[in-house]
Image (cartoon, rainbow, N blue to C red):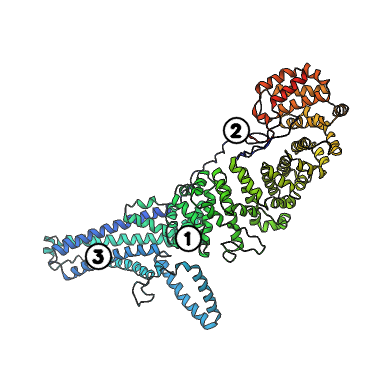
């Protein structure tokens, strides 16, 4: 017979599984299939930059060669022999080319900082747009005063968005000279430099073509040929012509790719950055182009958007930080590029620190960056190694906690984020991202310790488990306010991970969680009103199951009004669809069995609920019969029969069903029924047991033979049915005590030999009633060896 359980040893396995059987082995998480990396869209830009750099460097080298030839050979060796026209043509070409080289360098510098790409077509379009804008503003001023108010509103909004930039200059708006207004603003200077290059190239072509066609390099042609002056000038004009033509070819290629082919727009679309415009892609292109020009032409090919974005994000410029955050967000959420992106971010501690730091940015202008960093961290934490790096940063858990705003619509004061800071939609988005990050971090034991020690974090998490009655009952409203339902779901999943933590940390976490007064009541509301949300009910039941590992929590759960009744109603509700029965009702059944384990007060509450008849009938339902048998077994084991004599009569009526199951079922079903049978025999007199055998159509010899066969079949303890041999011995003992005549039957069937075999192969796993992973939780009052000795004594 089952003795009373001793102290519960609380060690919870994070692997989960059924608490009524130990895990045979911890199976590693299956690897996800690795897809081949998709071609990076920025390769088009780096290749474009390489080709431009090749043309630019060839043109520049030709220009340098022409400059050296003109200064050393022509102006140095033939200065006195040059005609006046040749002298000034050479001088003009040198000055023009020098201006072009200078303006080219200045243009690249300015375009790094500007928000547009300089090209002939773009400049023309911009000029037309500005003229139209001037006439449009004039018509608004002449027509009515509403336009001014609209413009004022837009100006205020723009000022509020750029509040952080008021203390510094925007590079494209810097006035290069004093008292010149908009004329010498840097962006206008860039346009001037662009057209200056075009003009200088055409000037070089015209001058060179004129001189090469005429070939009039001096009054005395024979003298010029004898002194090599003719050849020197021909070579110089040829070099100048080739350089200018190459530069125009480069510009034509530039215009075609930028304005006609629209390579920046296409790459921007492939990167998924349409929302932020082409500013980020343009900056990347100019960066690659500059590297190809300033170093090797292959330096730009080594660049990629992810590393570029990471460099921008760790900078001190708000504009660059915003661009970097947007790029990393898009790439980390793109299925084709997320693996490579997250790998690069995860191996850069400085990058992770910046992302964690951004969670604390509460300025309204930084809301987008804050949202992007939270999204990136949630993706980053999906890998265990990355989650360890994130949690290892000092203050990381506190930063994640700062984006959680658990204030309900009850008029309470908000936290630091503030009601006026962000919208309700964004608030719930932040909440969901914060809960998702914590849920993924909680997969590691040490991270659970940090979460539990963070001040006020557990209270926030539990506050999110509350679901309003209207959301639970109305599917349409739940679909509209899906963010709130998602917050409840993620908080419940996070809470389940925390209560499953192992060792002393798990005990402390469960104690702290159960000590918060809203924990059980919030879950109760979900159990009571969440018929349309079975997934939430299942999570709530699992949390209560693990909280019940602590004896004090078991009494709190059972003593909270409506919890046990709610669980029993779900478990015995046959109206739940079949596709949900195995999930919700099975989890709820485990919870009820766990609450009844070792708790006389909870067992008494169940007797008062008048659900015994429903539990007996549930033994005939194959979907919930296992947990129904477990619950009945605990009710019988931890209840004084003299107090509930009338109710126990209903338990006796289940005897026939149990006997049939023992003879017909195998494995787990057979184990559970064999475990319940001794308690039913204990309630019966010999006459009642005889009637039970007749009703079941099973003889005592057949039952005895089934028990002997169980011991023969399971020569060693099996993790799937760890208690079946123990239960078989308990039933053997109870049968011999109820009817001494069965002793002879067991002797004839060789029970003694089987008991000796069990004694030699007994294991510690058979001394526990409940398991979590591979750790036993509740030890039986008698060991299996003591039961064998008692059975051997009765057989003798």
Residue 741 seen in render = yes
Tell me residue 745's x, y (percent). 80, 18
Secondary structure at numbered mark 3: helix
Left or right relative to 486: residue 577: right
Mark 3, Cα crowd under 10 Å, few <14 / some 14-19 / many 20+, is many
Q: Which quadrant would residue 651 be assigned to in this image?
A: top right
The answer to whether the residue labelled 1 contacts the one labelled 3, judged by CB atoms less than 8 Å apart, is no
> Under tag 1, what secondary structure?
helix
Q: Which residue is mark 3?
A: 208
Pointer 2: what residue? Answer: 25
Residue at the image point whose x is 58% and y is 64% from the top: 418
Q: Dot 2, crowdedness within 10 Å: few (<14), some or many (≥20)?
A: few
Q: Residue at x 40, y 64 (%)?
A: 113
Instruction: Give the distance between the C-alpha atoms of the residues marked 3 and 2, in whole angstroms.
Output: 85 Å
For this view, does 465 lie left or right of residue 354?
right
Tag 2 secondary structure:
loop
Whether tag 2 and tag 1 are in contact, CB under 8 A, the answer is no
Say which of 605 and 444 sits in front. Answer: 605
Rendered position, 431 above or below 81: above
Q: Is residue 559 above or below residue 205?
A: above
Q: In 3D space, how far apart are the residues under numbered discs 1 and 3 (Cα atoms)? A: 49 Å
Question: In the rendered image, which residue does mark 1 sit on?
Answer: 322
Q: Is residue 181 above or below residue 394?
A: below
Foreground mark, 1 or 3, reads: 1
State which tag comes first along the sequence, 1 or 3: 3
Farthest top residue in view = 748
Image location of residue 231, percent across then percent down: 17, 60
Q: Nearer the viewer, residue 321 or 287?
A: 321
Q: Quadrant of the N terminus?
A: top right
């Amino acid at each position: 017979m089952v003795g009373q359980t001793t102290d519960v040893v609380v060690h919870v396995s994070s692997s989960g599984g059924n608490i009524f059987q130990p895990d045979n082995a911890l199976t590693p998480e299956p690897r996800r299939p690795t897809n081949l990396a998709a071609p990076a869209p920025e390769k088009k830009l780096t290749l474009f930059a390489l080709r431009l750099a090749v043309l630019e460097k060839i043109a520049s080298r030709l220009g340098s060669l022409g400059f050296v030839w003109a200064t050393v050979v022509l102006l140095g060796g033939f200065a006195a022999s040059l005609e006046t026209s040749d002298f000034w043509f050479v001088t003009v070409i040198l000055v023009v080319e020098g201006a072009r080289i200078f303006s080219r360098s200045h243009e690249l510098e300015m375009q790094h900082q500007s928000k547009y790409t300089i090209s002939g077509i773009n400049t023309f379009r911009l000029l037309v747009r500005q003229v139209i804008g001037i006439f449009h503003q004039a018509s608004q001023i002449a027509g009515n005063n509403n336009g001014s108010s609209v413009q004022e509103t837009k100006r205020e909004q723009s000022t509020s968005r750029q509040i952080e930039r008021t203390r510094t200059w925007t590079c494209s708006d810097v006035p290069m000279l004093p008292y010149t207004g908009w004329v010498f603003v840097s962006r206008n200077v860039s346009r001037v430099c662009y057209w200056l290059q075009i003009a200088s190239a055409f000037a070089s072509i015209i001058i060179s073509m004129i001189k090469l066609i005429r070939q009039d390099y001096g009054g005395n042609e024979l003298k010029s040929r004898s002194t090599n002056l003719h050849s020197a000038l021909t070579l110089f004009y040829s070099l100048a012509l080739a350089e200018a033509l190459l530069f125009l070819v480069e510009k034509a290629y530039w215009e075609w790719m930028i304005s006609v082919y629209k390579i920046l727009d296409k790459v921007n679309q492939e990167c998924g950055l349409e929302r932020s415009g082409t500013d980020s892609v343009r900056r990347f292109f100019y960066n690659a182009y500059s590297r190809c020009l300033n170093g090797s032409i292959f330096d730009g090919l080594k660049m990629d958007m992810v590393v570029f974005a990471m460099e921008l994000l760790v900078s001190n410029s708000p504009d660059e930080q915003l661009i970097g955050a947007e790029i990393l967000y898009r790439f980390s959420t793109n299925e084709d590029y997320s693996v490579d992106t997250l790998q690069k971010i995860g191996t850069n501690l400085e990058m992770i620190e910046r992302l964690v730091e951004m969670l604390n940015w509460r300025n309204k202008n930084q809301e987008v960056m804050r949202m992007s960093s939270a999204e990136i961290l949630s993706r980053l934490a999906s890998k265990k190694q990355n989650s360890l790096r994130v949690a290892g940063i000092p203050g990381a858990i506190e930063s994640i906690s700062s984006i959680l705003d658990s204030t309900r619509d009850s008029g309470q004061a908000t936290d630091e984020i503030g009601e006026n800071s962000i919208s309700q939609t964004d608030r719930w988005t932040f909440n969901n991202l914060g809960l998702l990050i914590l849920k993924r971090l909680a997969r590691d034991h040490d991270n659970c310790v940090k979460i539990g020690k963070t001040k006020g974090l557990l209270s926030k998490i539990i506050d999110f488990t509350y679901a309003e009655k209207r959301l639970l009952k109305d599917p349409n409203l739940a679909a509209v306010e899906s963010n709130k339902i998602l917050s409840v779901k993620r908080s419940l999943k996070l809470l389940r991970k925390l209560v499953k933590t192992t060792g002393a940390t798990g005990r402390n976490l469960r104690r702290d969680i159960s000590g918060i007064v809203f924990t059980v009541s919030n879950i109760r509301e979900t159990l009571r009103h969440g018929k349309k949300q079975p997934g939430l009910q299942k999570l709530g039941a699992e949390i209560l199951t693990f909280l019940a590992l602590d004896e004090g929590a078991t009494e709190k759960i059972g003593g909270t009004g409506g919890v046990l009744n709610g669980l029993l109603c779900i478990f015995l509700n046959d109206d739940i669809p079949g596709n949900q029965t195995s999930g919700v009702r099975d989890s709820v059944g485990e919870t009820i069995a766990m609450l009844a384990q070792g708790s006389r007060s909870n067992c008494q509450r169940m007797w008062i609920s008048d659900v015994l008849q429903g539990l007996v009938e549930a033994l005939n339902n194959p979907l919930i019969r296992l947990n129904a048998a477990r619950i009945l077994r605990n009710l019988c084991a931890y209840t004084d029969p003299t107090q509930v004599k009338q109710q126990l009569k209903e338990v006796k009526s289940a005897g026939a069903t149990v006997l049939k199951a023992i003879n017909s079922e195998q494995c787990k079903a057979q184990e559970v029924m064999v475990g319940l049978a001794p308690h039913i025999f204990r309630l019966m007199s010999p006459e009642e047991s005889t009637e039970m055998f007749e009703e079941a159509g099973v003889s005592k010899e057949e039952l005895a033979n089934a028990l002997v066969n169980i011991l023969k079949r399971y020569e060693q303890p099996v993790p799937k049915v760890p208690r079946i041999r123990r239960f078989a011995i308990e039933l053997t003992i109870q049968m011999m005590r109820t009817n001494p005549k069965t002793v002879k039957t067991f002797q004839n069937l060789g029970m003694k030999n089987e008991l000796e075999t069990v004694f030699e192969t007994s294991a510690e796993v058979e001394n526990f009633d409940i398991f979590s992973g591979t750790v036993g939780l509740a030890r039986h009052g008698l060991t299996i060896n003591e039961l064998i000795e008692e059975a051997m004594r009765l057989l003798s």
